[in-house]
Image: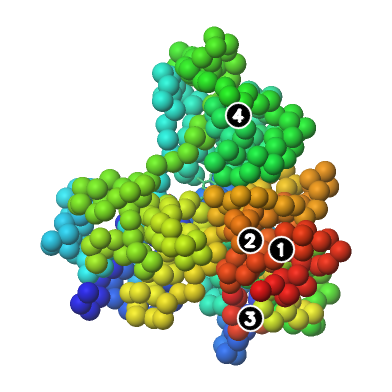
Amino acid sequence: MGEIKRVIIIGAGQAGGETAQRLRQAGFTGDITLIGEEPCPPYQRPPLSKAYLAGKVDMDRLLLRPANVYSEERIALLTSVKAVWIDRAGKKVRIEGGRELPYDALVLATGARPRKLPLVGADLEGVHLFRTAADIDAIRPRFVAGAKLIVIGAGYIGLEVAAVARQTGLDVTVIETAVRPLARVTSPEVAGFFLDEHTRQGVRFLLGGQPAVIKGKERVTGVGLADGGELPADIVVAGIGVTPETTLAQHCGLTIENGIVTDAQCRTSDPNIFAIGDCAARPMAHFDQRVCRLESVHNAVEGAKIVAGVLTGQSAHNVEAPWFWSDQYDLKLQIAGLFQGYDHVVFRGVMADRSFAAFYYKGEKLIAVDAVNRPGEYLGAKMLIQSGRTLPPDVITDETRPMKELVASAR
Amino acid sequence: MAKITYIEHTGKEHVIEAPNGQTVMEAAVKHAVPGIDADCGGACACATCHVYVDPEWLAKTGEAGSMEQSMLDFANDVEDNSRLSCQIKVSDALDGLVVRLPKSQH
Ligand SMILES: Cc1cc2nc3c(=O)[nH]c(=O)nc-3n(C[C@H](O)[C@H](O)[C@H](O)COP(=O)(O)OP(=O)(O)OC[C@H]3O[C@@H](n4cnc5c(N)ncnc54)[C@H](O)[C@@H]3O)c2cc1C
């Protein structure tokens, strides 16, 4: 790459917003253009299914930075503007309306799109996706005590929505095609714990359920099931996962495989184009350089740090072990590492106390932790995973010794 | 509303007017005070908003809760006056608060 004077970032979400900010923090003085199709400045999505849905925080508090900061820092923020074409040879981005913007370095931070229910009736009023602040604003008017909510998909977002709904007094049914909730993201044991908790809180589950049709004329009235049954609904929320937004990258011929593929520096198959956040997949330092596409705040922020470092010629960013969290009722789940491929799991504390940690091992190596109301276990395990250290299962589960002491003794 | 002074590890000071209800972390992040990362946005999930509360203010900011304390156990260079700034809510009572930032959050 030659001298970099103009950086364009496509996608003004968490990854894109952080990139702009961190470029300036790292001393980049050139032009920064941040193009986002949503109407507002970059904001955090995690509260959407938590405090924002509950009506406890307003949009201002979700913004990564106040709107005025962008002009103060000479970041050209284009909101409600979609990028429609990348001309790699000419190093230009075309935006809706036809204007072309030249770049020296381009960052793709286009995120992911929620999957639409593949069912007749999915477009009825009252059937909602759950990704943007606008999605939640559309749900909120009818999200009131007594309303009947059906959540389709029992991933973290689906369960968080169910938790807020119960706390708000809605009648909640979760339909999940798999035989357990959280099937893709945690172990059967931890999934069972959350299933029990939600059941106790009054959520009904239809596991192994097959939604077949969304019923209603203009507005949704219910969900028809493959077995002929029907459940009444005032609101349906689809939480069945996302697909990485790779349209632009595809059209300009970048390598794509479950996300835009990059190297550890977040560089795509075009050296002038980077990709970060939910839309991108890169080799993971702590996981045998396996190429992973993660959907998390940590991953979005880390991508931003890496790219800001590369573009300003600073020393390599120290990559963290992946981390994630989920809040449901008074339970704080904190996750570090990647549990996929574990061969056994051990527990510190007991589930009945609603405070425990599940440690995942592959052979002797600690690869991940799910900690429920156990922040010390979470941070301790995260440090171990990050530094490639481990503790034998019978040691890490020894509750007579504080986690801090155990971590200090690990090799 | 409270006037809060953040002192970077280098000694550089940032004085910010923070509205009530925000957290000490949020006020810093919104004004791009370097040295407070707060990657998780205040969910008490990342322990990267560690600050040292000026001893004179400790009584007013209160003590760390148990969740916060367990996180602080694993932060770098923890002192008796360490707090996670995402857990300190701004109020009129904190007008004049002074917090110092650690050398690094990681
Ligand atoms: C409800 C919810 C709860 C979550 N909870 C957690 C949590 O508790 N913890 C956690 O770690 N993670 C959580 N996540 C995940 C986390 O929010 C995402 O991983 C993160 O937002 C990814 O950031 P991103 O910038 O890659 O993508 P996004 O935030 O999706 O931003 C991408 C942006 O790019 C825009 N865009 C796409 N294409 C174009 C184009 N051609 N032109 C212009 N703009 C374009 C999109 O409209 C979007 O605004 C949650 C996500 C959701 C939806």
Q: What residue is shown at x 58% (from left), y 69% (from top)?
A: A388
Judging by the rendered image, the residue that carries numbered circle 4 is: A179
Secondary element at image label 3: loop
Comparing B55 with A68, the one in front is: B55
* Subunit under mark 2: A
Asked if one can make out residue A11 in the rendered structure from this viewpoint, the answer is no
Judging by the rendered image, the residue that carries numbered circle 3 is: B101
Q: Disc 4 residue type? A: Val
* Subunit under mark 4: A
Residue B27, quarter of picture: bottom right
Please tell me how many numbered marks the rendered image carries: 4
Residue B18, quarter of picture: bottom right
Q: Disc 3 residue type? A: Leu
The percent coordinates of residue B19 (x first, y second) are 64, 64
Q: Disc 2 residue type? A: Glu
Image check: B90 left or right of A339?
right
Judging by the rendered image, the residue that carries numbered circle 2 is: A364
* Residue at the limit of the structure toward the bottom, as seen here: B11
> Spatial distance from mark 3 to mark 2, Cα to Cα?
38 Å
Q: What residue is shown at x 63% (from left), y 44% (from top)?
A: A187
> Spatial distance from mark 4 to mark 1, Cα to Cα?
32 Å
The correct choice, above or below, for B96 with respect to A259 in the image is below
